[in-house]
Image (cartoon, grey):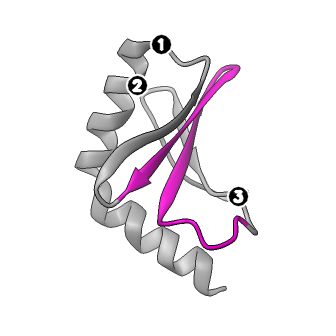
Amino acid sequence: MPTVLRISGFRFHFYSDEGTEPPHIHVEAGDSECKFWLSPPALARNRGMSAVDIRRVERLIYEHQAFLLEKYDDFQSE
């Protein structure tokens, strides 16, 4: 479960062996977690994250989308 970005109190990471799902990122903040598809950015799942934090995460994903997609591709090719 490599962490690829820590910003604004959020930890962006991947899980290994998630099958053939489209590119996505998991984001944790405290005890909450959400999952976003990366292309195009869209909320896939939310577990306890507030609507305000979801919007913050979405904005961060848009800002760092190219970087996150690159890291996702690197992680999947290992």
What secondary structure predominates along the stretch shown in magenta? strand
The amino acid on which the numbered mark 2 sits, given as a three-letter code, is Ile
* Region rendered in magenta: 18-38
Residue located beneath label 2 in the image = 54
Q: CA distance from mark 3 to mark 1?
A: 22 Å
Q: CA distance from mark 2 to mark 1?
A: 6 Å
Residue 57 place in picture, x, y as percent:
38, 33
In magenta stretch: residue 30: yes
Residue 26 place in picture, x, y as percent:
57, 45
Residue located beneath label 3 in the image = 15
Residue 75, image quadrant:
bottom right
The amino acid on which the numbered mark 3 sits, given as a three-letter code, is Tyr
**Which circle marks residue 50 in the picture?**
1
Question: Could you tell me which secondary element the residue under label 1 belongs to?
Answer: loop
Question: Could you tell me which secondary element the residue under label 3 belongs to?
Answer: loop
For the point 31% across and 39% down, the residue is 60
Of pointers 3 and 1, the one earlier in the residue sequence = 3
In magenta stretch: residue 33: yes
